[in-house]
Every structure is written in structure tokens, then in C-alpha cells.
Amino acid sequence: MSWIFGNKNKNTSSSQTNLQAHRTKQIDSLKKANLNPIEVLPNTEYRITFVTGNNNITLVVSLPPLFPQDPPSISVHPPVYHQWVDSTSKIINCPNLSSFSMHSSLAAVVQSIIDEFKLHPPQLQSNNFGVVGPPPFPPATSSVSGYSSSGSLAGYYQPPGAQYGTGQPEPMQGTENSTEQAGVSPGRVPDVFSAFPDLKTKSLTQLYELQDEEDKILEMIQKLPEVGKFAEEREKISSECIELARSNLSYKPILEQLRQWILEKNNVYERAQEEFEQHQKRLMTRSEDFHPSVIQNNLKVALMEAEEESESIVDQFLEKKMDVEEFKQRFIQTRSLCHARRSKDEKLTQIILQHGYRS
């Protein structure tokens, strides 16, 4: 019902035509499977009678409005006892019916039920009073869904108990229960004739003409109290959404300020990270330069240089390139430096061996 939301879906007619085509194809499958279906209500209700054991069993096949998108409703007459049949005579445990979909075959579902009943014949319930024939058909009057052109109730069959004065009339299969089979809650959607009492006075011809006048149908539906409540609820929710959107927009300046603050903090973080990486590289370089093994190597080189220098001073003195006083001063200074460096080298070697430093 796209009109409720203010825009009309252009594909509605196409979708309905496609669904109707599938519906017709499913109905034709009953005829092609030689099941001899009897049409009670066009495109809505069909009855298939067969013999199992010594009894005639009738399957009442009711097609909901959205069939085959929604599964069919199949009931049994007369009432029987069987594992596939519940207390209201509906088929409930048939695997093919339970898994019915758009691509299923209605004829295959019905045939599986017939095969099951022939393989395991059901037992007739005792309250049938010997009546085992199919339920009577609605009279051939100008009526729709059980109402005659004069507005009186017609087309209702009475179960065997009612025929003998022990029960109340029950509506035909496919009228009251069709909303349940269509997946619609009866508490939400009112009965058609209770919601639209004017339809009771219309003839079949008038009803067929009415179904082509979409504007009148929409006008009738819009007058329903449920539709009015739905429209009010929609307007309320729409107003709440608008208020919520305005409230969210009022936070935009604050969000922009926070976004700018986050960007600035991110820039500070990136600069601090870059500076940290640079200091970390310097630390690694310094730690390598001051490693005990590196210091020891440098100390050994310095010791060798001091010893070479002291030997050079001796050679210069022997060659009489310097006097005794200069020789004594420079030689003592150089040899003292050699002994100091050798002592440091020995001490450092002891520390390395003690603490296990490795290059």
C-alpha cells in the first residue's frame, strides 16, 4: 500500500500481474495432473474428491490472496483422524505443504496428500452421523464470499452436526481463515464486510466494476479507523525524526571544534614521534660508541700510539736531535701515558670478562 507512504510504486501493477500469472499456472497444474478439481470460487477455492479405503474423501483447497507467495490452506471433509490432520480438519504435517514456496507445485502437494491417504487410510470421526459425502457447494447466486445480491448471508454450508440441529453454521473454508493463511493478524485487519458494510448491498457485477476503480477503493480504505491511526502514527514518527535530525545538527559546531582539536593533537603527536625516533637513533649510535669492547679497542690503539711515540723519542735522542733535558721530559711523559693506558686496558679486560660484555 504505497499510497500510505506518500509515493506510489510504479511496479505495483506489474508485480500483481506477475503474481496472478503464477497463481493461474498453479491452478492449471491441478487440471493437468488429472486431479479433476471442482471450482467453487474462481481462483480461490477448489475441491478434489478421491476414494481411499471404502470412503470418499474431499480435499478443500483454499488459495489466499497472495498465493502462491503464501502457501495454500487445505482441509479435509468429512473430518477424519490422521497424523497429517489437526482437530480443525486442516492438513498441517504434509512436508510438501509445510515447505511450500513460489517454485513449488500445488498439484504435487495435493498428489502427495492423496498418496499418503491411500497408503495410510484415515479413520472417519464418529460425529459425522454417517454423512461421508463432500460438503455442499454454495448456491449459484450473484454473491461474493457468501453474501447474496440482496445483502443476505448465502453460500455457507453447515457441517453434519448442524444439518441434524446440533451445531451452529460455520463459514466456508477460505473466507474467515484466509487472513490467517495470508499471514495477517485478524486482530489488526477487520472483517471485510464489517469494515465495508456497503459491499453487502452490491451485486456481483457492481463488485467486479468496483475492483477496477482504484480511487474509490483507496477512498474506502482511507476511511478505516486502523488506517487513520496508522497515518497519525506515521506523522508522529516523522515529527520525531525531524526533531532528532535538528538536535543532531545542533551538535555540528561542537563536533567541528573537536575535530580540529583532534587534528592539532595528531600533528603534535606526529612531531613528537619524529623527534623521538631521531633521539632514539642518536642513543643507539652513542651506545655503540661507548660499548666496553669499543672502548677497549680504542684504548689499545692509543697504547700502541704512545709506545710508538716513546720509541720515536729514543731514536731522536740517539741521533742527537734533542738534548738530555728535553729527552728526559718527553720520554718520562710518554712512558707514563703508556703505563696508564696499559693499566686501564688490563682493568677493562677484567671488567669485560667479569660481566660478560660482548661486542
Image: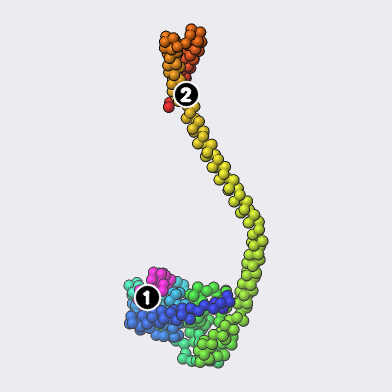
Mark 2 and mark 1: Cα distance apart in space: 93 Å
Is residue 101 a member of the stretch shown in magenta? Answer: yes
Picture mark count? 2
Q: Residue at x 52, y 86 (%)?
A: 211
Query: Would you say residue 198 is visible in this rendering?
Result: yes
Q: In the rendered image of this protein, does residue 94 appear above or below residue 304?
A: below
Q: Quadrant of the C terminus?
A: top left
Q: Position of residue 340 (x, y in %)?
A: 49, 14
Q: Residues within 10 Å of mark 1 (few under 14, many from 20)?
A: some
* Mark sitting on residue 178: none
User: Is 14 left or right of 56, judged from the image as shown?
Assistant: right
| SS class, disc 1 | loop
Say which quarter of the image contains residue 115: bottom left
The quarter in which the N terminus is drawn is bottom right
Task: Indicate whether 264 appears above or below 62.
Answer: above
Choose mark 2 or mark 1, whichever is in front.
2
Q: Label 2 sits on what residue type?
A: Ile
> Of residues 49 and 111, which is closer to you in this image?
111
Considering every residue shown, the one lying at the far top of the view is 324
Q: Nearer the viewer, residue 93 or 79?
A: 93
Using the rendered view, name the quadrant where residue 19 is placed.
bottom left
Mark 2 vs 1, N-terminal side: 1
- Give the residue at mark 2: 295
Helix or strand or loop: what does disc 2 sit on?
helix
Q: Is residue 58 in sight in this rendering?
A: no
| Residue wearing tag 1 | 105
Magenta segment, which residues? 91-112
Q: How is the image coloured?
A: rainbow
